[in-house]
Image: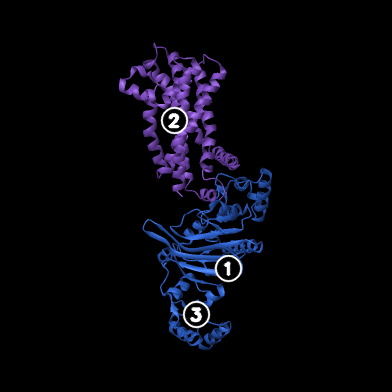
Chain colours: A blue, B purple
């Protein structure tokens, strides 16, 4: 059995009357990616801050790289890199100055720090902006500089708190490649995310948390099996055909399709051969559609399946 | 060994703070324009009325060391304000996740303030010189006086850092520091001789750390009356006292803030 590099049991943390964590267990093996999946306010950031020694848990224990985060924080800090949800770079410093500063705080010589900074800036495609003040960077550039800053000391354990939130899809793919290459170099990565798709793309194991509790822990494969693989989303071109469309989908999937209230119908489907089947039947029934997609369940759907209730994501409710 | 590397780390963060000053030089207003305005106002508005024997020049000689004391206290406000605003930013999360001593970001900021106080001293003595201020001792003692003032300033800065770590907004830092600095600077011998004040106030003026600093500087710059060594001793005692009390308090405030 491989050694556990991140190991937390029964973490609890309250802020005033709000219980951010109510007994969370997390574990990640050496060289693996653990995704912590959950909506806003689930306690993801709190858990990361405890593991990165920025916060003290009220109860529970946590070890990172074999060191207790409470009793040996200095040892833990030697082995970790942290990229927060809000890019923690110094706005008044240039890209190079930011990275050299971190290198010198990590006891690199000035020369070694400069060399490492140049190396990282190149890797993250920031060489051209190296001598520009970070204040003038775009959101994506700041994220990259922030991640570069957390890698200066070649940490064995890397915490990424929602590394792709707010990035456009192309930049998200770039970030995924970075995570993969970190892992192939032997690092262990804990990343938090709101997207099952991201967890599925990167993680070896996924821990789902909600309201400060773990509600599922599994491999991406296992989790998808529980929440039922793919979702098929269809919108009829003619709203009058809505009910007929539902009948077709029910006949194929054996499940009652769900309506989002605007005529778009979603149903859980099993197997890889379902798509041609659906297309053939829609054609036979003569139902034209203007939206048709096969995708992994959204976080909302994952939560609905796991807990039977919708996640209480305020930002989502505000949008509806 | 550990101490050694902490000091080196503090210098790295000192450099960070100095770079930030070069990006926004207006941060230096309180150590450049402000002392010039104070010196001009006190000399020309109050100088004639308070003046010793009616001589404006005599008052200038009396005023420059006093103003160094007062403006040092005033200029300490900004470090507390900056730290209060800075600590909310993500970069402090980064510092806290690095294997460096907890005190390093605070010590780095205070070290960077050395340059601000140096600017302040040079401006006040330089502008004073233009208006006719002359030391009557020698340049070495001038350096000693300014060195003493800067040492005191760096110790007093910890009061501001502590307030900055304790109150919620940077505006409140200014409010609290004003409450402290006004009685300290005006209830001292910085602007008028203590002998003109009522007895109960004299009692306060005589133990006020700024009075000791100002007396010590007057002694070093003007050869002035009274035993200079005693005043220097008292000033160092205050420097030590401020450090012993406010450095741990500031550090505790910083750690609690996380």
The quarter of the image holding the N terminus of chain A is bottom right
Q: Left or right of A320: which side holds A5?
A: right
**Which mark, residue A268?**
3
Decide: is A126 above or below A313: above
**Which mark, residue A203?**
1
At mark 1, the secondary structure is loop
Real-space Cα distance between discs 2 and 1? 55 Å
Q: Which chain is indicated by disc 2? A: B
Residue B38: image x %, image y %? 43, 25
Q: Can the viewer see residue A281?
A: yes
The quarter of the image holding the C terminus of chain A is bottom left
The residue sitting at 49% across, 84% down in the picture is: A249
Question: Which numbered disc, 3 or 1, marks the residue closer to the eye?
Answer: 1
Question: Which numbered disc, 2 or 3, marks the residue closer to the eye?
Answer: 2
Residue that label 2 marks: B73
At mark 3, the secondary structure is strand
Q: Badge 2 local density, few (<14 within 10 Å), some, or many (20+)? A: many
Residue A221: image x %, image y %? 56, 75
Decide: is B217 above or below A295: above
**Same chain check for tags 2 and 3:** no
Residue A33: image x %, image y %? 58, 65
Decide: is A281 above or below B135: below
**Which mark, residue A306?**
none
Q: Left or right of B109: which side holds A318?
A: left
Real-space Cα distance between discs 3 and 1? 23 Å
Real-space Cα distance between discs 2 and 3? 70 Å
At mark 2, the secondary structure is helix
Q: Which chain is indicated by disc 3? A: A
Q: Which chain is indicated by disc 1? A: A
């Amino acid at each position: 059995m491989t050694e556990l590099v991140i190991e937390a049991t029964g973490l609890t943390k309250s802020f005033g009357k709000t219980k951010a964590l109510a007994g969370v267990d997390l574990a990640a093996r050496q060289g693996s990616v653990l995704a912590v999946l959950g909506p806003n306010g689930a306690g993801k950031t709190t858990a990361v801050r405890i593991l990165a020694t920025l916060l003290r848990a009220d109860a529970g224990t946590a070890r990172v790289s074999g060191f207790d985060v409470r009793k040996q924080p200095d040892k833990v800090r030697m082995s970790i890199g942290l990229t927060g949800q809000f890019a923690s770079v110094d706005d008044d410093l240039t890209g190079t100055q930011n990275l050299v500063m971190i290198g010198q705080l990590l006891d690199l010589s000035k020369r070694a720090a400069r060399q490492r900074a140049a190396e990282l800036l190149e890797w993250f495609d920031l060489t051209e902006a190296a001598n520009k003040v970070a204040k003038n960077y775009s959101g994506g550039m700041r994220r990259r500089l922030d991640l570069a800053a957390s890698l200066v000391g070649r940490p064995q354990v890397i915490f990424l708190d929602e590394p792709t939130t707010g990035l456009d899809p192309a930049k998200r793919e770039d970030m995924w490649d970075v995570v993969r290459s970190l892992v192939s170099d032997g690092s262990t990565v804990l990343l938090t995310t709101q997207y099952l798709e991201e967890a599925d793309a990167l993680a070896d194991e996924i821990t789902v948390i909600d309201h400060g509790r773990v509600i599922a822990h599994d491999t991406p494969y296992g989790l998808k099996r529980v929440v039922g693989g793919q979702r098929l989303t269809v919108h009829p071109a003619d709203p009058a055909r809505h009910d007929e469309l539902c009948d077709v989908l029910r006949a194929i999937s054996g499940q009652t399709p769900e309506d989002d209230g605007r005529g778009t119908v979603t149903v859980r489907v099993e197997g890889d051969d379902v798509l041609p089947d659906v297309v053939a039947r829609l054609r036979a029934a003569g139902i034209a559609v203007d939206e048709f997609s096969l995708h992994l369940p959204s976080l909302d759907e994952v939560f609905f399946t796991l807990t039977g209730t919708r996640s209480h994501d305020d930002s989502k409710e505000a949008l509806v | 060994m550990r101490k050694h590397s902490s000091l080196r780390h503090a210098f790295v963060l000192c450099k960070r703070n100095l770079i930030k000053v070069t990006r926004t030089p207006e941060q230096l207003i309180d150590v450049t324009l402000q002392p010039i305005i104070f010196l001009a106002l006190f000399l020309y508005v109050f100088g004639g009325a308070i003046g010793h024997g009616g001589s404006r020049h005599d008052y200038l000689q009396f005023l420059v060391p006093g103003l160094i004391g007062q403006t040092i206290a005033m200029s300490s406000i900004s470090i507390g304000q900056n730290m209060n605003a800075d600590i909310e930013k993500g970069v402090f999360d980064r510092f806290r996740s690095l294997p460096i001593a907890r005190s390093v970001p605070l010590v780095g900021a205070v070290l960077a303030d050395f340059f601000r106080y140096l600017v302040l001293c040079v401006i006040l003595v330089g502008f004073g010189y233009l208006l006719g201020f002359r030391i009557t001792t020698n340049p070495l003692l001038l350096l000693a006086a300014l060195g003493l003032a800067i040492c005191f300033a760096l110790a007093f800065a910890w009061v501001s850092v502590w307030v900055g770590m304790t109150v919620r907004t940077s505006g409140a830092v200014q409010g609290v520091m004003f409450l402290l600095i006004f009685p300290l600077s005006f209830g001292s011998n910085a602007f008028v001789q203590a002998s003109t004040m009522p007895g109960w106030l004299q009692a306060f003026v005589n133990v006020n750390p700024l009075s000791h600093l100002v007396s010590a500087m007057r002694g070093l710059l003007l050869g002035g009356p009274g035993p200079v060594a005693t005043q220097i001793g008292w000033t160092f005692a205050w420097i030590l006292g401020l450090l012993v009390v406010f450095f741990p308090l500031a550090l505790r405030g910083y750690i609690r803030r996380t």
